[in-house]
Image (cartoon, grey):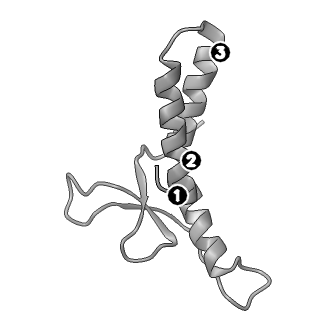
Amino acid sequence: MSKHTPGPWCISKESPTIIKRDLSLIRSDHGVLIGSACGHPNSGFYPSESESVANARLIAAAPELYEVARQISEYQLEGEGDLKGIAQRARAAIAKATGEPT
């Protein structure tokens, strides 16, 4: 099984429906394309523009959501870890996915 592109992922500054790996700290082109969540306002085939933006936010938060789910699973199995820290990271990942403030 292949590994996914490491995070963090972010929404592109060029379009709110393009997801990139944030490499802004090490490269000037600000990232590698992860995907696009295109929408069309008058199509039954594509999601609406607002749904596309929401889909892009959810996709961009996927690495953080995965990591929190992994940490919760380990906590449940081993009973060790920082549960308060895990909960804080979960809230931050959910806020990133929904576009709400943390």
Where 51 sits versus 59, above or below? below
- Residue depicted at x 25% and y 57%: 24
Report whether 46 appears left or right of 32. Answer: right
Where 92 sits versus 24, above or below? above
* SS category of the residue bearing label 1: loop
Instruction: Tell me if mark 3 has few (under 14), some (14-19) or many (20+) residues whose alpha carbon lies within 10 angstroms of its own.
Output: few
Instruction: Tell me if mark 1 has few (under 14), some (14-19) or many (20+) residues whose alpha carbon lies within 10 angstroms of its own.
Output: few
Judging depth in this view, the residue of 32 and 51 nearest the camera is 51
- Residue depicted at x 63% and y 22%: 73
- Residue depicted at x 62% and y 80%: 49
Quadrant showing the N terminus = top right
Gap between marks 3 and 1, in whole Å? 28 Å
- Residue depicted at x 62% and y 64%: 55
Report whether 82 appears left or right of 14. Answer: right
Residue at the right extreme of this rendering: 44
Tell me if label 1 and label 2 are in contact, CB under 8 Å. yes
Residue bearing mark 2: 94
Q: Position of residue 2 (x, y in %)?
A: 55, 39
Where 62 sits versus 44, above or below? above
Residue bearing mark 1: 100
* SS category of the residue bearing label 3: helix
Judging depth in this view, the residue of 13 and 6 nearest the camera is 13
Residue bearing mark 3: 76
Q: Position of residue 40 (x, y in %)?
A: 65, 85
Residue 36 in sight in this render: yes
